[in-house]
Amino acid sequence: MRKNLPLPALLLAVAVVLAAGLALRWHRATPAAGPTLQVVTLFPQSRVLPDFNLRQSDGTALVPGELKGHWTLVFLGFTHCPDVCPTTLAQLAQAQKQWRTLPDSTRPRVLFVSVDPDRDTPDRIGEYAHGFDPDSLAATADVPALEAFARSLSLVFAKSPAPEGAPADQYSVDHSAAIAVLDPQARMAGVIQPPLVPQAIAADMTALTGMPPR
């Protein structure tokens, strides 16, 4: 059993704790107006994101304008992830089934962003995300663009070298397990921290969809 975390994993853990603490402190200091929520922590004010340009699984560009009109849950991951990613996407898929009856024009969306562009092609991430729910969006980009996008959401990721003796391409990617919540103006509006409860996520997102714009 390893007694010490690798440096990237340690830095990632520290960054995640700091981001979660900051989000919670904002929430407690000035509660956001709106419905009573179970698991979504809304910030007092939504934050405009810097411009970003990711590539969707169908090859088209994903820019801020593409996310407007819907509440969106953003999860960072990668298709070789052994546990957190498939578990999270399966839980989000359960939530998606519960809000399926909402109009397509306003229905919340799930965006899976691969932070492993060396192995995850657009086709691969599309197949992976759609295997959990066909309505999910999937995108990736080069590492600098992904780092900027993750940072704007107060999320982090870091490549972890392959175990000793394993092929170099058997590396892993440490990443935030939290889910960023974007409002219908594609602004950073809040966060969902694990452990995830699909029924509560579905209830919160349904309530937010019916809320007047902030």
Image (spheres, helix red, strand yellow):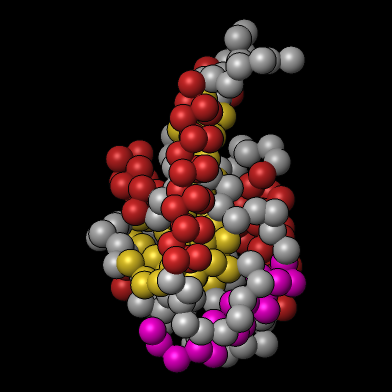
Instruction: Name the quadrant containing residue 55.
Output: bottom left
Where residue 173 appears, as percent x and y from the top left, is: 53, 33
> In this image, 88 relative to 5: left or right?
right
Where residue 171 appears, as percent x and y from the top left, is: 55, 25
Q: Residue at x 57, y 84 (%)?
A: 35
Question: Is residue 211 inside the magenta stretch?
Answer: yes
Where residue 179 appears, as percent x and y from the top left, is: 54, 57
Q: As drawn, which residue projects farthest toward the left?
A: 51
Residues 183 and 105: in front is 183
Work out whether 134 lies above or below 17: below
Work out whether 9 lies above or below 161: below
Q: Residue at x 74, y 15 (%)?
A: 1
Q: Residue at x 61, y 37 (%)?
A: 80
Q: Is there any visible trace of residue 62 in the rendered image?
A: yes
> In this image, 201 relative to 76: left or right?
right
Residues 169 and 164: in front is 164
Where residue 109 appears, as percent x and y from the top left, is: 54, 72
Q: How many marks?
A: 0
Q: As drawn, which residue projects farthest toward the top?
A: 165
> In this image, 64 relative to 97: left or right?
left
Q: Residue at x 44, y 53 (%)?
A: 22
Range of residues picked out in magenta:
198-214
Question: Is residue 144 inside the magenta stretch?
Answer: no
